[in-house]
Every structure is written in C-alpha cells, then in structure tokens.
Amino acid sequence: MTNGNPTQFKTENQLPILSSSSQSPLWLLTIVAISIFTSEIAVMIAFVWLPPPTVQMGVILDGVLLTMLVSPVLYLFLFRPLNVHITALHQAQDSLQQQRDHLEEEVQKRTAELIERNREIADREVHYRAVVEGATEGILTLDKQGLIVRDNTAAEKMFGYDPGMMANLPLVQMLTPDSAKRCLGSDGLLYPVSNLSLEAQNKGGKTIPILLSISTFKYENDHYFTAIIQDISERVMFEKRLARLAYYDSLTGLPNRRLFHDRLGQAMEHAHRNGKLVGILFLDLDHFKDINDTLGHLFGDRLLQETAKRLSDLLRKEDTVARLGGDEFTVILESISNTADAEDIAKKILHSLRQPFNLGEHEIYVTSSIGITLYPLDDNDIERLIMNADSAMYQAKLHGRNTYELYTSKMLSETIDRVALEKSFRKAVGASDFLLQYQPEFVLHYQPEVDRYSGEVVGAEALIRWQHPELGMLGPDQFIPLAEATGLILPLGEWVLRTACMQAVAWRAAGLPPFHVAVNVSALQLKNRNIVQQVAHILKETGMDGRYLELELTESVVIDKSEELITILREFKEMGITISIDDFGTGHSSLANLQLLPVDKVKIDISFIRNITTSKQDTAIVVGIIEMAHKLGLKVVAEGVETEEQLMCLLSHHCDIMQGYHFSRPVAAENFEALLVNRVEITPLNQSHQ
C-alpha cells in the first residue's frame, strides 16, 4: 500500500529481492563451491578406501563442515530474501485486513443507511396509504389505457364495489355515456382535466354527480393517470335547496314573486307568438288577519298551506299559482282565449275556498277576493299587470268580498288614490298626543239598536268616521283596514272607546235614559296585554258604568278558545261589560264555540239579512242562528235591516234586537238624542245601506 491509499497494493516487481549490491563476493562463492566439491569427493573416497567407522566419522565431519560452509550461503542467498518476502506478505496482509475492516465499516454504514431509507420509504408508503385510504374522495391510479390499477376505499364505497373488484375496470365504465365523452380525447384515451362536473354511475346504476380531476405521472418509463373523484351529491342538493329558497315560497312550496315574474314573462312571450291571452289573477283571503290575530300564526300558516294546495289542485299543469307574501296569491292562466276563461277559473277558486278547512280542532271557513287582468288587453308590462290585478282585487273587497272583479282603467287611479289615502291617514293619526286631545278629522256617529217588541232604542253602536280634508266624510270600510295594517288601530281604538264612554256619560248627565253603547274591538287590540287595564282606566277616567258598555268582538276571535282570551273576557264581565260577537255567520266559527266563552249576544252579519226574504238558504241560516243562540241563553241582534219585509221576517222568528237603515242611519251625537226621547217608528226608509 502506498501513499496511505488502502486501495493501492504493491505489485510482484515491487517486493524486495537481492540486488547486485546485496550479493556476496564471487570469491566467497567459489571457495564455498570448491569446499563442497572437495568434501564430497573426500566422502566418496572414504566410502571406498576407509573402514566404516572412519567413514562414518568422516561423513559426520563432512556434514558439519558442509553445514558451516553452507549456512552463511543459505542465509545470504535463501533465508534473508525469504524473510524479506515474508515480512512483505505480513505487511500486505495487515493492509488487506485494514482495507477489509474499512470496507466492512463502509458496508455496515451503507447497509444502515439503506435500512433507514427503506424504513422512511415504508413510513411514507404507510402514510400515503393512510392518506389515500382516509380520503373522502375516490382516488384511482390508471394505466395509459384508462384501466384501474389501484383504488382506495372511498372509491369502492362510492361505486359500490367490494375491495379489489375495481381492478382492471375502465374509468369510463363508471361514467354516464355523455360524461365519458367529455373526458376522452379524439384518440379515445383519457386526458388531464380539472374539476370537471360530470355524472357517474355506481354498480347498481344509480347516478351520482361528481367532480373529476385527472393528472398524469411517469413511473419506470410508463405513463399513468391519477383520477380524483369527489361525490358532490350533498352540494348539488344544497344548491337545489338554495335555488328553491330563491325561487319558491318556504311555507307553501309555491313559486315566489321572483319566479312568478319569470313565468309571467315566458307566458306573455308564448301568448304573443300564438295570438293567445294570459290571465293574471290576484287574490287574498278575506279577514285573514283576524284568524292570525286570534288563533295565532301557526294556524294561519296551516291555512295558507291548505289554500295553496287547493289552488294548485284547481289549475292546469301549464298554469302557475304563486304566493307573493302574506295571504296574497297570484295565478297565471296561460294561453286562454277570452275573458270568460279567466272568470270560470275565478268562480272555481271562490267555490273551493268557501269549503271548510279542517285545521286540527278548528273548522275554519274563509272567503277570498279576486282581481283579474288580461295580457295584452289591459297592458303589456309585468309590473303594471300585477298592479292592475291588485286594483281589481281591492274593488272586489269594496263590493262585499267573496267575489271577483275584472280590471278597468278606472281602477288604477283608485289604487293611486288609496296610496294617497294611507299617507293622509298616517298624518291624521300621527300626533303623539293622539289620546290626549280631540282630533277634528275623526268623529263618532251612532246607530240605534231597536227592541223587537217596543220599538225603543236599547243601544247604540259607535261607528267612527273620518272627515278627510279633501275627500269628505269616509266610512270605516275605507280606512279601518289601513289602521289594522299599519298598527294604528291600537291608538285609534283606544280613542274610540274613550270618546264613546265620554258621550254616554254626557247623555246620562243630560237626563236621557240609560242604554248600552257598543264599541268595536279588533283582534289586534285583544292581543294587547294591557287591554283589561286600559278599559278599566277609561271607565274610571270617564265615570262610565261598565253595565252600559258593550264590547263587540269580530267572529274570528271566537275561534281562539285560549285561556288567555277567556280570562280577558271574564275580567270584562266582572266590570259589568256586555260581550257580543259581531258579523256572526260569515264562516269563521260555530255557535258551539260560544259555550266556552262568556258571551252575551251575537250579531247576525248583514250579508244574511240582505237576502233573508229572497234566499231560502240565508233564511235557514238566520233561523238556525236565532234558535241555537236562544238555547244557549244569548240575545240575537240583526244588522242591516232595511225593509219592512226583512223586519217582519225577523220578528216572526223572534229576533231580539234589530239595527239598520230601516230605523236610522248612523248619526252624529247631537242628532242621536232625538231618537232617544221618542219611540222609533217601524217604517221603511227606502235607502240603501252604505
């Protein structure tokens, strides 16, 4: 080994040998050779001529002499060089041993490194498999032909295969035909894609919405694909829910205003191409707010759901019924030929909604008002068509509800007037000291209630009037709905009660005989937690005797048989107040409900009295109400008596009290005193009820 390099060894020529400088002198070699030769000759002669003992001694001496002579020569020519070679061999062995030890160290080191590297590779493989197996996405390794080489558990579950059963299956087999085409190139092979929205099919044939990403990699000179498949079924369902929230009413499942606009636009385009008409119906439920206020929003919502179902069942598949909000519904009648087609549908809707709604323990009767407009006869703008139908619906309400009206150009100006009216009403009721000072724009008129036998005035209903500065005297039907919709009915109702009580006390102070003064109380007022304290305070403040105060509740209030309502009415009764149910018979309740409430009177709705002499059905209803009320110990008041015939019919069926234009219109307080001092003559007035 040279230069300390363990990998370099001495060659054979490099081993130490006898050089010319290390050889003995020639003469020494010559003497040794001659001596050996002579000695050998002497031995031979001795063997021949001398006796054996002498020969033996000579041989011995010759061997000694030969040894003495040969030893230096052997040392010089044999042992010394041999010793040098042996030493060199030992050195070479030592060097080889060092090199072997070093190589063993290197091998051990390299082996340890390989073991550590293999362990790291194994750990990474375990980690990789854990990641792949734990992934929620399906992960596939594909060969260049698109056949599955490897898959993970998520992919097996996604496609419904047992472990190992997906091997060698083509990826395109997992996709629908249309989706497979989208991830194949012109050569029929896969190509890289990213987040491609496709449809896959599992083993059972079920379609699954997926996102597919394909990338390529190279391994041992072969090309492979990695496919990552994400099941987006939940996302698709969520997007559908979002779309439904955006375009459908969450309560009824009907199209909302946005989708209604879209479908109306499509219907108008279709009608324009085919020379047809489109009917737009705008409807809402009459007195729905009373039901909401008395039974609560839960029952109100259920009523809206049932209404939506009935409307949907009535219409054709190509028609649309939508809910715009609250109790407002709209209907699109596509490709109709004339106005009569729309009227026929409106009549069917009115008839259907008049049928009772069974909502758990309550049987609800409702009616609706419908407005109709036609495209392109009335307009060709979506917003104006909706406004037209709304205006027609409002006219239907003004004409008694439970009917429909066709749009006319005059109605739009009336709608504009209604908006202006609301603005004026807010201004009239907007004073912060409304309850403390007299409002000259609002006044009370009083209509007498007449005893059926004596003809004497036994009560008066206080009816509010609005002396509008521009429109003149307005009746309650023209602004009370605005008061209820805006919440201003609360301060307005309190003012009416206080003013009526003050007037009754003034009449008593003037020496007039005592009688009941009836004041209407809305369902919204009864929802006021302080209503009992409010009434008690007004009675005390005005000095009114509770025995002469009558509170009229709308019939829808009777539906709510809650303990809270019963408690309120009982507290009114403890004050001596009379409780009556107004507009009875319009369909929200039955007399059986009255057994649970502390009620004294029922007032039959004017719609039944109007036709009592011409309609057998209305006559039967009125007679049934009178008889049942009497059995329950209740008095009966007939509203809207206008003719002698109506009066005679009611008298014949023992109606207790009557009220209407046949006796007197509602009059101002100062004019009402004349009716109190004289017995009312039972004579017709030949004037229509307004």
Image (tube, rainbow, N blue to C red):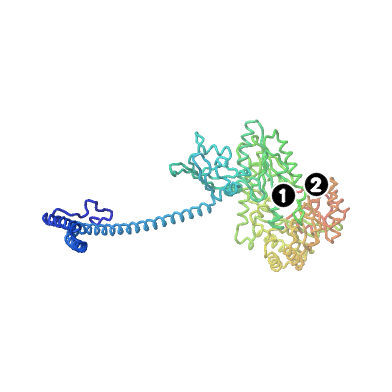
Q: Which mark is residue 581?
A: none
SS at circle 2: loop
Which of the 4 quarters of the picture holds residue 540? bottom right
What percent of the width, then of the height, locates residue 640? 79, 51
x 23%, y 56%: residue = 3
Provide residue 12's location: percent of width, then percent of height.
Answer: 24, 51
Q: Residues within 10 Å of mark 1 (few under 14, many from 20)?
A: some
Instruction: Decide if residue 309 is on the left or right side of residue 649.
Output: left
Q: Nearer the viewer, residue 687 or 632?
A: 632
C-alpha separation, residue under disc 1 versus residue under disc 2: 43 Å
Q: Quadrant of residue 637?
A: bottom right
| Residue at the disc numbered 1 | 306
Q: Which numbered disc, 1 or 2, marks the residue closer to the eye? A: 1
- Screen quadrant of the N terminus: bottom left
What is the residue that sits farthest to the left in this orientation? Answer: 27
Depth check: 330 or 380 in front?
A: 330
How many residues crowd around disc 2 within 10 Å: few (fewer than 14), some, or many (20 or more)?
A: few
Left or right, residue 33 beside residue 355: left
Q: Position of residue 525 (x, y in %)?
A: 69, 60
CB under 8 Å between discs 1 and 2:
no
Q: 324 or 623: which is nearer to us?
A: 324
The residue that label 2 is drawn on is 686
Q: Earlier in the sequence, mark 1 or mark 2?
A: 1
In the rendered image of this protein, does residue 173 appear above or below residue 44? Answer: above
Q: Taking 686 as reference, is 369 left or right?
A: left
**Does residue 407 show up?**
no
- Residue 139 visible to an observer of this rendering: yes
Q: Amino acid at mark 2?
A: Asn
Amino acid beneath label 1: Glu
Query: Can you give x and y, in whole percent of width and height, for residue 91 in the image?
Result: 26, 59
User: What is the total number of numbered labels drawn onto the structure image?
Assistant: 2
Q: Which SS class for mark 1?
A: helix
